[in-house]
Image (cartoon, helix red, strand yellow):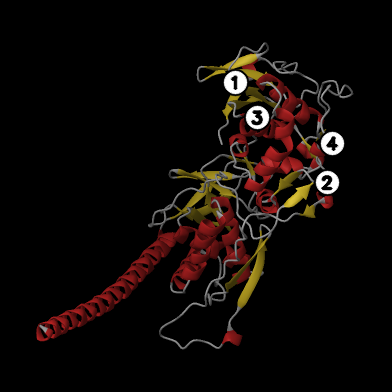
Amino acid sequence: MEYVNKQWFITLLICGCTLISYAQNFEDAFNAFARQNEQSFSRFTDSINRAFAEAMVTDIQAFKGERPKVRDPEPKPASIPGDKEQVPAYQVHPGFKPTHPEQTARLESDQPSIPDVQLPEPVHPSSPEPPAEQLNYTEFDLFGDNIRYVIMPFPERMKGIAPEDVSAFWIQLSECDYEPLLQLCRAARMERDFNDWAIYQLVLEMARQAYPRQYNEQVVLAVFLLNQFGIEAKVGFGYAHLFCLLAVEQQLYGLSFADIAKNRYYLLEAVPGDIDSEGSFSFRTYGTPFPKPTKALDMNVRVPLKSSYFPDIIDSAINISTNMIELFRTYPQVDISVYANAQPSDVFCRSVERVFKPYLQSLSTVEAVDFLLAYVQYGFEYAADNEQFGYEKPFFCEENFYYPQNDCEDRSVLFAFLVHHLLHLDVVLVDYPGHLAAAVHFDEDVIGSSLMYNGKRYVICDPSYIGAPIGLEMPDFGQGDRTVVPVGY
């Protein structure tokens, strides 16, 4: 019996060793296969970039850019009508009133911090690893967070700005180890919830770090990285400079643009000499699209940024994310639906619930909407964007608690968010020439001006018509002037 057991044990041992050997051989074979495929993919990518670089020269075309569009040519009122002296019976609570950003203070957050994205030093199998003191690390601030990465050994400069020069430079870039920069973009997308516009800003900053004071090289590197990452962009050839032409999914305002193939490309950084007195511009670029799959940039903020820093607190009541404020500061003017449907930060939403819900819990639905309407009407100082900024700047929801004044667009976006988030009611924006208001769908009959949208009745609520109750429309605006902007978070 003992002999049998020994034989059985020896058999199992032999089988086990065989399986271990097989597993090791399989792992070695798989790793070799992976390395081979990685090399094949790299060669494939290099061939794509080379063929594309050649098309920059052979497919160069002349284009005429269009003048910037204006979202609403009607001027906003310098002041708003209504009873500014008569405060409603349920006075707006002092803790609701926004203050100037200089009065902000730090607040500890219960959210876990997100560590800075740090990339390892790129490894080149064909060359020895350089000593640590030779590594060229850099660190820059983006949306309030520090980002640290290694500057890649890119080519020093282009010979000129002719298509042939850009083509040669593009091939040189494709032969460099640019993958760590794409890894940084992917990490920012996954770990910090960067949207497309935030990725674009990250790529621009990486290009500035790689080529300080070399604007044309910055442009080509930025377009190169955007294409590799999957965002459609082109190098534009201007009178004396290169520029980035970025394909954008939404309509942008105040920026020159050109329709090329199926995309609309915007000139986001104007260069003197490229734009004439009427706002249009002539340029050259290649018609050939980048061979790898790319898409137009999406301006929507579907998920708020995550941050490794604490949020700011305003008036010990409403908390705002400075990361989001910094992101919004870089935005060009977009369709109002982008502002209305942007997802605010979690810390902002939680603070809104903490501040407002005690005042709403004993009110009926109509009374609660009336309370929020009065709060937005009386709680902010009115100023048109040109007066406050010198240009048109609609606010995202959180910005109302950062800047000292706001206008009808900003108030309507905020009111729509408060009604939807706190009361869970359907709400839309009502766009008039030179004005923006809101409208709420009630489950009961409410008297007042209204409109029909998707088979539901929405009652007008105007956050800029001081003292106006639910259902009262601002004078001089009629039903024929309305355009409905849907809202849904």
Q: Which of label 4 and label 1 is nearer to you?
A: 4
Residue on which the image places disc 2 = 100
Closest to the observer, 190 or 294 = 190
Q: Quadrant of residue 171?
A: bottom left
Label 3 is placed on what type of residue?
A: Val
Give the number of the disc on residue 419: 3
The answer to whether the residues at label 4 and label 3 have Cβ atoms under 8 Å apart is no
State the SS at label 3.
helix
Label 1 is placed on what type of residue?
A: His
Say few, some or many: other residues with alpha carbon within 10 Å of mark 4 (under 14 / 14 to 19 / 20 or more). few
Whichever of callouts 2 and 4 sits on the residue coming sooner in the sequence is: 4
Whichever of callouts 2 and 1 sits on the residue coming sooner in the sequence is: 2
Q: Which of label 2 and label 1 is nearer to you?
A: 1
> Horizontal and vertical percent for residue 45?
37, 66
Say few, some or many: other residues with alpha carbon within 10 Å of mark 3 (under 14 / 14 to 19 / 20 or more). some
Whichever of callouts 4 and 3 sits on the residue coming sooner in the sequence is: 4
> Horizontal and vertical percent for residue 293?
39, 54
What is the tally of numbered marks visible in this picture? 4
Q: Report how far apart the C-alphas of labels 4 and 3 lie in the structure.
A: 20 Å
Q: Quadrant of residue 135?
A: bottom right
Residue on which the image places disc 4 = 94
Q: Is residue 395 visible?
A: no
Whichever of callouts 4 and 1 sits on the residue coming sooner in the sequence is: 4
| Residue beneath the point at 56% across and 16% down | 452
Q: As drawn, which residue projects farthest toward the front? A: 1
Q: Report how far apart the C-alphas of labels 2 and 1 lie in the structure.
A: 34 Å
Whichever of callouts 3 and 1 sits on the residue coming sooner in the sequence is: 3
Q: Quadrant of the N terminus?
A: bottom left
